[in-house]
Image: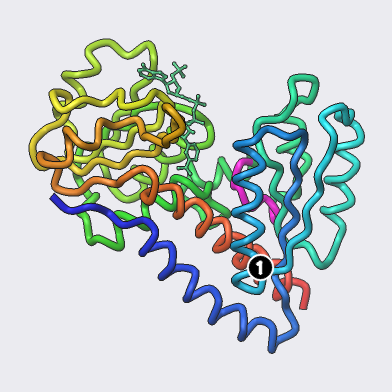
Amino acid sequence: MKIIDGNKVAITIKEKLSEEIIILKEQGLIPGLAVVIVGKNPASLAYVNSKEKACKKLGIYSERHDLDDSISEEELLHLIHQLNGKESIHGILVQLPLPKHIDTSKVIEAIHPKKDVDGFHPLNVGKVFSGMEGLKPCTPYGIIKLLEFYSIDISGKHTVILGRSNIVGKPAAALLLQKNATVTVCHSKTEGLTEILKTADIVVAAIGQAMFVKKEMIKEGAVVIDVGINRVDDRLVGDVDFEAIKDIASYITPVPGGVGPMTIAMLMYNTVQASKNQFFDAN
Ligand code: NDP
């Protein structure tokens, strides 16, 4: 068994980015990210803080918009339109979830596709599913980078994704399919889940249920990627029973320290990518 070290891979990606940013700055481009957060959800605040910290460390300009959760949808959309027009901002991230009175789809669609560094805009979603170049959602993209870093074969492998959300499960399926995996997507209505999982060469667990995936669901030698982040008794655990599975998996990601750091690294990557697309297209 080998533990996939997400922190190490994320550092490698960020080191390359920081070298690239130095060169971009010499060419007159400072990548810029705007982070918008509505309300004071502690988990969201923690994510936003780490994103800001990563920007600072890499030399990416970042600005943060902390909005009260009583803000109207109209006011939020107005801010996004302003950020769409701002030259120093190349990426816009609206931290989800949003309060119930705001239509999340409307907000995502308001972000200019070129500035959509989360890769959630329908245009970018369509590109991911069509295998076209575009901004890819950070978490699934991070999973691909992890597999590639460890030279794990994807092509032809039966990959079972647990979870079909728009931010993880579905785009992970599209990206892995693009890499020639044979993909099965499971969800809460799936029948015979254990039997399906048992046939998987690669498992991607993204359901948000602490330690749901048990040893008896995993084939000996499978690669196990745990996306889940669940707080149990003040400690973070994944969707996978790591201790029980680590001895039968060929590779496994820990929580924390697996997929999590990759999400932030790929956000930085997307911001630099978006900035180059906008700057060099305009010059
Ligand atoms: P969602 O709640 O949006 O989606 C959960 C999915 O899991 C749904 O498709 C649901 O099925 C499915 N599901 C739930 N319970 C079961 C079950 N018992 N059996 C089979 N399928 C089930 O979650 P997200 O995709 O947003 O997040 C998933 C997890 O990943 C969370 O723990 C989240 O915190 C974490 N996460 C981690 C990130 C990182 O950077 N590491 C980034 C993003 C998320 P159905 O559609 O039928 O309801």
**Which residue type carries mark 1?**
Lys
Relative vertical location of residue 145 with respect to residue 15 in this rendering, above or below? above
Residue at coordinates 33% horizontally, 39% vertically from top-left?
226
The quadrant the C terminus occupies is bottom right
Report the residue that reaches farthest toward the bottom.
26
Q: Position of residue 75 (x, y in %)?
A: 91, 36
The quarter of the picture where residue 245 lies is top left
Left or right, 259 with respect to 154, comes to right
Which one is in front, 134 or 3?
3
Residue at coordinates 58% horizontally, 62% vertically from top-left?
268
Label 1 element class: helix
Q: Position of residue 136 (x, y in %)?
A: 53, 51
Q: Position of residue 10 (x, y in %)?
A: 43, 62
Q: Which residue is mark 1?
A: 56
Left or right, 112 with respect to 234, comes to right
Which one is in front, 76 or 41?
41
The quarter of the picture where residue 223 lies is top left
Q: Ligand 1: which quarter? A: top left
Which one is in front, 148 or 16?
16
Q: In terms of secondary structure, what is the magenta stretch mainly?
A: loop
Q: Which residues are magenta?
A: 114-120
Q: Position of residue 65 (x, y in %)?
A: 81, 48
Which one is in front, 220 or 64?
64
The quarter of the picture where residue 61 lies is bottom right
Relative vertical location of residue 59 with respect to residue 263 in this rendering, above or below? below
Residue at coordinates 71% horizontally, 38% vertically from top-left?
108
Residue 51 belongs to magenta span: no
* Circle 1 crowding by C-alpha within 10 Å: few under 14, some 14–19, many from 20: few
